[in-house]
Image (cartoon, rainbow, N blue to C red):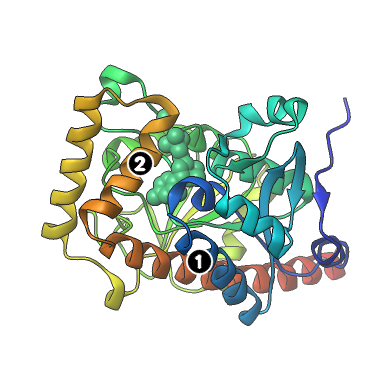
């Protein structure tokens, strides 16, 4: 069966056709990850950072049932403002298309669509993972299984300690996903630069990371790669402050019986409220930082692929 082709914006289509650098961006961070208007401002700022670093941004979402890769500013604004937009992981896309609805795409759905579009690199804030208490709830994000089957490199700031970080790293190992920390030995914990867990690998330049990407795909592994880029020092939160906030939010979710796909959006919103916006500020800075690294990787990867082609 032939695979579907998402609808590419003109700019993204041209960049892909010429082998130019493109960075995919997700939209659940817009619809469920941040409040309006910070969500829209951040989405636009992140696109600008990608351009400043020499690549073309491709924000991905479902708009009235259409799979879109590269959104117009008006489409971004509508997604950011509309209440009750669906959160779609990869498994939800087909039904969203049939119903003709709009949806924010999670890391899992965004990887799937980026791959169909021919985009290799994707920047976000944090990926989903194994939730605390997963031994009872079985709550493991589809982001992790998608990383095990789709060849996209995802640049994130590690994972939040709303998750069980140790189990998340174990699960990534099972899924055969290389976890590469950028410029650090430790796997970062989103709001903080350290998690207490060593990363499997450390690389110190975007050029080395994309070389590893090309080799990883050349081995026919079939999996994605997770690139963990620690939050800039100046924007990092104090662990004692944010860990307490996260623990309160997790306890509240448990008391209220919140689970399944509502859990992550609930925790993100509550952490933002309980931290009086401190977490949101840090979140915005780390996403921009990830976008810059992803764009540099995309520029280096485009050059590497062109050189590889010329030699073959
Ligand atoms: N974690 C964050 N910010 C986010 C998300 C997770 O720190 O915005 C979003 C991403 O879109 C991610 C999704 O793919 O939540 C994971 O949801 P779940 O845990 O339900 O799989
Ligand atoms: Mn879940």
Q: Residue at x 62, y 81 (%)?
A: 52
The answer for how far apart the CA atoms under marks 2 and 1 are is 28 Å
Residue 274 image offset from top left, x and y in percent: 21, 52
Residue 250 image offset from top left, x and y in percent: 22, 37
Instruction: Judge the density around disc 2: few (<14), some (14-19), many (≥20) Cα neighbours within 10 Å.
Output: many
Q: Secondary structure at mark 1?
A: helix
Relative to 96, residue 160 above or below: below
Residue closer to the observer: 175 or 242: 242
The residue that mark 1 highlights is 42
Residue 312 image offset from top left, x and y in percent: 86, 63
Q: Residue at x 29, y 60 (%)?
A: 279
Residue 72 image offset from top left, x and y in percent: 74, 62
For residue 250, the mark is: none
The residue that mark 2 highlights is 169
* Ligand 1 within 8 Å of the CB at mark 1: no
Relative side of 192 to 305, left or right: left
Residue located farthest toward the bottom when viewing the structure as drawn: 52
Q: Residue at x 45, y 57 (%)?
A: 125
Residue closer to the observer: 126 or 275: 275
Q: Secondary structure at mark 2?
A: helix
């Amino acid at each position: 069966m032939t695979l579907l082709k998402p609808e590419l914006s003109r700019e993204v289509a041209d960049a892909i056709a010429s082998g130019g650098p493109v960075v995919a961006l997700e939209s659940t961070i817009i619809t469920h990850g941040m409040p309006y208007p910070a969500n829209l401002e951040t989405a636009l700022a992140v696109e600008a950072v990608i351009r400043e670093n020499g690549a073309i941004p491709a924000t991905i979402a479902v708009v009235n049932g259409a799979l879109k890769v590269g959104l117009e500013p008006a489409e971004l604004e509508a997604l950011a403002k509309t209440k009750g937009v669906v959160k779609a992981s990869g498994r939800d896309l087909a039904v969203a298309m049939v119903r003709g609805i709009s949806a924010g795409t999670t890391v899992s759905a965004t990887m799937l669509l980026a791959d169909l579009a021919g985009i290799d690199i994707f920047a976000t804030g944090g990926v989903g993972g194994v939730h605390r208490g997963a031994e009872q709830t079985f709550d493991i994000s589809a982001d992790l299984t998608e990383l095990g089957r789709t060849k996209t490199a995802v640049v994130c700031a590690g994972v939040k300690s709303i998750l069980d970080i140790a189990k998340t790293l174990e699960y990534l190992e099972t899924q055969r996903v290389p976890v590469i920390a950028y410029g650090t030995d430790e796997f970062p914990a989103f709001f903080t630069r350290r998690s207490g867990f060593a990363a499997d690998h450390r690389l110190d330049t975007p050029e080395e990371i994309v070389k590893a990407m090309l080799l990883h795909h050349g081995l026919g592994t079939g999996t994605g790669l997770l690139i963990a880029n620690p939050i800039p020092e100046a924007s990092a939160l104090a662990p004692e402050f944010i860990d307490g906030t996260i623990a309160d939010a997790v306890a509240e979710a448990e008391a209220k019986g919140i689970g399944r796909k509502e859990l992550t959006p609930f925790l993100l919103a509550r952490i933002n409220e309980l931290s009086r916006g401190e977490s949101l500020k840090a979140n915005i800075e780390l996403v921009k930082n990830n976008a810059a690294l992803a764009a540099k990787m995309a520029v280096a990867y485009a050059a590497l692929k062109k050189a590889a082609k010329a030699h073959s």
